[in-house]
Every structure is written in structure tokens, then in C-alpha cells.
Amino acid sequence: TTITHAKVGLRTEALNSLLLFVLLESFFNFLIIFFLIDIDECLFSPSVCGPDSICINEIGSYNCSCLNGFTATNPSLTVSINNTCTDIDECLFSPSVCGPDSICTNEIGSYNCSCLDGFTATNSSLPISINNTCRGTFYIYFCVYYYLE
């Protein structure tokens, strides 16, 4: 009878150990998942995306995009340190971003419009653009010549 009782005790002990092992394994797996820390590649220096770009951290990864006024050197590839963002020359667009009778000056990440000599903005309180174009100004000059003797 004692031997039988010992066998039952061993089986119970083995089951308890197995149950404890499963519980501990589940707990540690939970801890690993719970405490799995995403590495924010966007905080790396130098930037993983390169200059003139925005880095968006994602779980286990990151995504790069160019700032407004910039485009990827090779637009068919994703933005990265190997395919950085370059300035867009808006002045090369056709039709002109500034409209007729104007001068477009490219700036880093932007552009500036000004009217040709003899022209002013249709609405002087707004910047010159395709929606606020330059119009001619007409001045009439009178020259009066008096001859005095």
C-alpha cells in the first residue's frame, strides 16, 4: 500500500510541476510580449531618413516621407538615407505657379513670385500666385513745356 501511495504522490508531484511549468512559461511569454520595447529608429542620429524628411516610427519599423517642397531623389523608391529628399524646383512647372507677367524664384523647399516691372498683383494684400496674378499698370505722363521769354 505504501508503494502505491508513493506512485500516486509522484504522479501528483509531476502534474503539479508540469502545471507550474506551463504557468511560468505563459507568465514569462506574457512578460516578454508586455515588455517588448519598440526601438524608435526615428531617434537615431544621423537620421535614418536623411535631411528634409519626416520619420514616422511604427512598431518594429519606421516610415520616411519628404517635407513639403521636397521629393525623393528617385521617386520610384522609398525615402531613406540612400534615397534622400531633394528640393522641388516649382519654377519649372508648366503652367507657371506664379501666373503670367511674373518672375518665379526657387527657394529651398519653396518658391517666391514677383511681378515684372510695370505689373502689380491683382490683390495687393495677397501673395502673387496662379490665383492672384500680376496685371499691368498704366501710367500717363504729361510733359508740359513752357517757353518763357
Image (cartoon, rainbow, N blue to C red):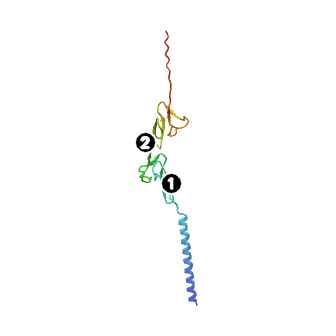
Q: Secondary structure at mark 2?
A: helix
- Residue 75 at x, y percent in the picture: 43, 51
Residues 14 and 78: in front is 78
Residue 114 appears at what percent x and percent y? Answer: 48, 35
Residue linked to disc 1 = 56
Q: Which mark is residue 92?
A: 2
Location of residue 26 with respect to 61 vertically, above or below: below
**Farthest-out residue, top:** 149
Q: Position of residue 69 (x, y in %)?
A: 47, 45
Considering only vertical position in the picture, is 117 above or below 17?
above
Amino acid type assigned to the residue bearing label 1 in the image: Ile
Query: Viewer-nearest of labels 1 and 2?
Result: 2
Q: Amino acid at mark 2?
A: Leu
14 is higher (above) or lower (below) than 33: below
Location of the N terminus by quadrant is: bottom right
| Residue occupying image coordinates x 49% and y 54% | 42
Residue found at x 46% / y 47%: 70
Pick the residue in front: 93 or 1: 93
